[in-house]
Every structure is written in C-alpha cells, then in structure tokens.
Amino acid sequence: MKKFIYSILLVFICFEGQKAFAQSDMISYGLNKTLPQANNLNPAILPDYKFSFGLPGLSGFHINTAQNFTNLELLTSKDESGNLNTSRVLNKLRRNNRISSNNTVNLLHIGVRSNSSYTAFSVNTRTVSRISLPKEFFQFVVLGNASDELKDGLLDLGRLSTKSTVYTEIGVSHGREILSGRMTVGVRLKYLMGHAYADIKSFDASLQTYGNDDFRGDSIEMNVNQFDIRTAGIAGALFDDYFQDNDIRTSVLSNRGFGLDLGATYKFSEKISFFASLNDLGLIKWNQQYTNQQAVPSFQYKFTGADVIELINGENLSAIDDFDSTINELEIVETTNESFATSLTARLYAGASYELTSKQTASAILYSEFYRGALIPAFTGMYNFQAGTFFNFAFSATMMNGRINNFGTGLTLNLLPFQIVLATNDLLSIVNPMKGRAVDFRFGINHTFGNVKKGKSRGKKNNKDTIETIDLGID
C-alpha cells in the first residue's frame, strides 16, 4: 500500500520540483544571429560572431513553465457570497488540461565561425516534464459526488498522464553553407546522461457516482484498469532501502543515450528565407541499477460513504481500512534492476522570414511538440531589429495553449567582450502576473568576439573593385 501511494506521489513530486514550464522557445529563434545558444534550436543557424563562449554560472539559464487552463486572477475570483468562484473556474477548464515544464541550464558553450561554417560545443542540463489532467478530475474534487452537474455521475479519468526526465546533454554541432551560400544545413550529435526519470503510463480509470440515489445512496464505484509506473536514476533509487550516495552518482553516470538535431535554412530570394529544424531525436537507456517498474492490475472498489468529522477524530475508520485492504490484496508486479529505454520529447520548428529593411525582419514560425502520440502546436509572428552584433531586439506574438495574446520579447546587448541576454516568451506573465499562464525567462552573459559579416562585406567589395579594374581581354 505504502509503495503504491509513494509511487504515484513521486511522479508528481518529480514534476513539481522542476519549477519550470514548457512553452516553445520562439524568442531565442528570433535572436538567432546574435544569440550563440540559438544554435541549440537549429544547428543550421550560423551566428555572426567569429568566436563565442559561455562559462558555468554566466552563460545563463532558461526557465519556462506554462499551463493551458487557468491563471491567478481566475483562482482568486469571488462569487456573490465572497467565496471562491468555483463555477467560473470549472467553466474555464478544458477537456484535457496540460501542464508542461522545460528547464535548461547552460553549463558551457563554445562556438567558432568561419565565412561559410559554424562549429559549436555545448553542455546543458535539462528538465522536461509533462502532466495531463482531465476536466473530470477537478469536477469531482470541487463538486463532490452528489452534484447534478456531473453528467450521469460518470467521471472518466483516462486522460491522466505524466512524464518527467532530467538529463545532461553534451553536444557537438556543425553547420555549413551550400548552394553558393543560398542554403545552410546543420547537424548536432548529443551524448546524453540521464539523472532521473518517472512516469505513469497508460492510466485508465473511471468513477461512477450516484449522488443522492434512493437505492445506492452516496456511494462511489471506482474502476481502474491496469497501468504502469516507471522510475529510474535518482527517482528509482528512492525505492532502494540500501542505496548509498556514491552508488547514485555511479548509476547516474551509467544512464547513457544519444540524441540528434537536424536543421536547414534556404534563401529563396533577396527578401524571403525559409528555415526548419527537428530537435531531440534520441533516447536514454536507464541502467539496471535503481530502476523500478510497477504494473498495477485492474481493480474495482466501492466506497459507501463516511462521516468526515468522525474521520478527523480518528473514529469509524472502516472505510479507509477497506480501501487499504483492497490495495494490499492487489498483486502488483514489481520489477527492479532491469534496464529500459525512453525517448526524448521531439520538437519541430518551421517557418519563413521576410526582410523588411537591411536591419528589420518579419517572421512566421510554426512549432510542434510530439508527446505520447499527440501533436501540440504553436504559431508565432515575429519582428526583429538588428544593429549588427551590437544590438538585437525581437518581439513576438504567439498563439499557444488557446491564447493569441501570448507576447514575448528579448534582446542581446554587446558590451565588448561581454554580451548580455534578456528574453521572455510570455511578457504578459511578467507585466501582469494575475492574468499570466506561464513563467518564462532567459538570462545570460556570453563572451563574444568578431563580426564575420564585416569580413564578408569587405571581401565582396574588394572582389567587385578588382573585376571592374582588370581587363580580361574577353569580348
């Protein structure tokens, strides 16, 4: 019983502990010419700096947390009696309420640029967490089992799922111009070290309530189909009564995997360009040490009601004892010390840009994320103003999580040899936290040197002058 409950709580704790959240990193894509870390989003992006590097504690971090169903203003709204307006909260809920989290800490970044190519080495620690909660889950908690608002008294909890992964990636990327500079292609190879993993897979359950039915009273029937719980790394070590700190460090280093990022850009005309990248194709194999898999069999349970006051006073605990007895009788199949592999959460960026002036660009970017067979999209319109490598500014409007007014902004300011990076993909949550649905912030300091564009410009000018002044003797 204790392990069963502990397993479920652990998955949610792994998620909540990240304090980051997932929304696409559109602004970094918009600052691609001056932000070295933008190469992590598309290895075909060639930053303008000849050399750049960022050190641990300086090159920065990106915190991103978001959900698609509520905000602080809604959660603090009052009804006519001065109580929490639960009906308004429930009306705003979606059929599938998603919470996601992305954390990235840049431990090291080194980039070297030539006239036609860019090579980068990077080390990042990342957290990727997702949770999905069906609307019926909240309805049952808020309305109880006797409410007429519950359709036929049946609550489908089958869309509940969660997944959390913490790992470090060591990547080497190379991007190069081809087709006489009209196209760039790039690839990044990544070595992965898994730190922690936890998920609830294939959860399928329902609650049948009868309200104040004359025959069945206020009873509740619970039906749960078989589902699996998996943990590994540090999360899996919590199940081992004999683990040692040194063993955990050894286990973490032995959880290995590989990843791949692909990217390309194409200059269709002097004004129009296209770009695309496919990120995080890969998997992590979790070492057999400190892995735990629990297959919970199908079961049914009928709760006939209890007096809350008596439960608080520790009296008449038969209802709890019955449930505890039902769980203890389950033949939960627990498998330990057996390795398994998990895939990364793949992401796709694709878009087009139009050069308004030599310093201004407008872009449209489509983002898609693949999670448990579902495609989660976002669409962004972007404005960018770039004054060489000294200053770069971007402003975006994104439609994601059902909102069109999801604005973002960011800038890079080059104060030789330091570059300051400030960006957010959700400006509303900073300006007006009461209405925000996300926490998104990027900050960092990079060291940058040289501007490859100046060299290219001089080269082109010199070549032109030379051709005009040399008589080749050809009609």
Image (tube, rainbow, N blue to C red):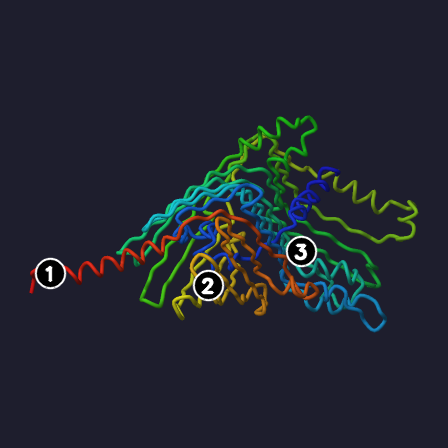
Q: Which residue is mark 1?
A: 471
Q: Is 228 located above or below residue 358 in the figure?
A: above
User: What residue appears at the point 42 percent right and 59 percent down from the top-left corner?
Assistant: 388
Q: Name the quadrant of the C terminus.
A: bottom left
Q: Are marks 1 and 2 in contact (CB under 8 Å)?
A: no
Measured as percent of width and height from the top left, residue 226 is found at 63, 45
Disc 3 element? loop
Q: Residue at x 31, y 52 (%)?
A: 177
Amino acid type indicated by mark 1: Asp
Q: Name the N-terminal-most of marks 1 and 2.
A: 2
Q: Residues within 10 Å of mark 2 (few under 14, many from 20)?
A: many
Which quadrant: the N terminus? Answer: top right
| Depicted 302 relative to depicted 149: above or below | above
Residue 355 visible in the snapshot = yes
As helix, strand or loop, the secondary structure at mark 2 comes to: strand
Is residue 335 left or right of 474 when viewed as pictured?
right
Q: Which numbered circle lies on residue 157? A: 3
Q: x and y percent of residue 296 in the render?
A: 66, 42
Is residue 159 visible to us here? no
Mark 1–mark 2 Cα distance, whole angstroms, equals 48 Å
Q: Is residue 230 left or right of residue 154?
A: left
Q: Which residue is mark 2?
A: 365
The residue lying toward the viewer, choosing from 81 and 168, is 168
**Counting residues from the N terminus, which is met first, the one under dot 3 or under dot 2?**
3
